[in-house]
């Protein structure tokens, strides 16, 4: 499998960014929802610190993914009606915005609350804004609503991929899955 994308499939670096980011977002979202189940206040603080560090990791991976994407090609799209192509591009665009906005809103919420922000206890990051406890609930609400909007858009994204795979029986999903051959395809020399 090639590191770079080809005109027929995504490369291993693009797949790494896609699947790692997806798993981190889903896991961190579930983790964020379960933080209230912590047994002690200290455990909750530890879980919250981990939640923030994972969110910062998502932000860093997203920025690296954008840098990679600028120099990587994009596989050709399988034929589809114009409205489906437009819907797919819209969903991807909104996903990208939300993947950026969600960790930034968490950072903003953390800054508004006046809390220190550490990345896995290695170093502190600066506050984005000055502490303002009157705005704390607004910032928390923005972060939470962005999460639920992201969940909705992810459901649309997964539904679209499954529709392509199960109904259209094209290569849209297969070209992003690791270690899978495309339908009706023999790999070229560089893809073996």
Image (tube, rainbow, N blue to C red):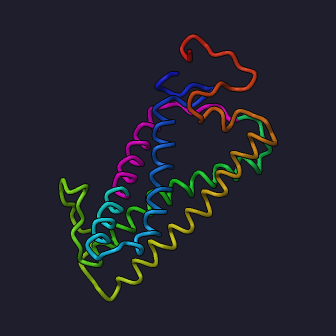
Residue span colored magenta: 55-77
**Residue 83: x, y in percent?**
77, 51
At a point 25% along the width and 72% down the height, the residue shown is 42
Name the residue: 55% across, 69% down.
Answer: 148
**110 in the magenta segment:** no
With respect to residue 166, does 95 lie above or below? below
Side of 29 where 175 appears, left or right: right
Residue toward you, 171 or 34? 34
Q: Position of residue 178 (x, y in %)?
A: 56, 31
Relative to 31, residue 63 above or below: above
167 or 85: which is nearer to us? 167
Residue 78, compared with residue 19, is above or below; it is above
The residue most toward the left is 123
The residue that appears at 51% across and 73% down in the rendered structure is: 145
Image quadrant assignment for residue 41: bottom left
Dominant secondary structure (helix, strand or loop) of the stretch shown in magenta: helix
Q: Position of residue 133 (x, y in %)?
A: 29, 86
User: 65 or 164, which lies in front?
Assistant: 164
Which corner quadrant of the image does residue 126 belong to?
bottom left
Q: Residue farthest to the bottom?
A: 134
**Residue 62 magenta-drawn?**
yes
Identify the residue at image location x=42%, y=73%.
37
Q: Residue furthest top?
A: 189
Residue 50 occupies quadrant: bottom left
* In the image: residue 33, left or right of residue 77: left
Whether residue 89 is situated above or below residue 17 in the rendered picture: below
**Percent x, y for residue 12?**
49, 30
From the viewer's side, name the closer residue of 128 and 103.
103
Number of numbered discs present? 0
Q: Quarter of the image containing the C terminus? A: top right
């Amino acid at each position: 499998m090639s590191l770079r994308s080809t005109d027929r499939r995504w490369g291993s670096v693009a797949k790494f960014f896609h699947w790692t980011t997806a798993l981190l977002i889903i896991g961190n979202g579930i983790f964020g929802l379960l933080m209230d189940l912590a047994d002690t206040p200290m455990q909750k603080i530890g879980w919250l610190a981990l939640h923030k560090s994972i969110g910062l990791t998502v932000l860093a991976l997203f920025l690296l993914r954008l840098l990679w994407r600028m120099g990587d090609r994009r596989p050709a799209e399988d034929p589809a009606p114009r409205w489906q192509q437009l819907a797919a591009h819209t969903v991807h665009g909104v996903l990208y915005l939300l993947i950026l906005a969600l960790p930034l809103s968490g950072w903003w919420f953390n800054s508004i609350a006046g809390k220190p922000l550490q990345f896995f206890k290695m170093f502190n990051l600066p506050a984005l804004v000055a502490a303002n406890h009157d705005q704390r609930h607004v910032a928390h609400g923005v972060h939470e609503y962005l999460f639920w909007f992201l969940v909705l858009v992810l459901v649309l994204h997964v539904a679209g991929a499954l529709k392509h795979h199960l109904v259209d029986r094209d290569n849209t999903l297969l070209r992003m899955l690791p270690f899978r051959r495309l339908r009706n395809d023999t790999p070229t020399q560089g893809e073996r």
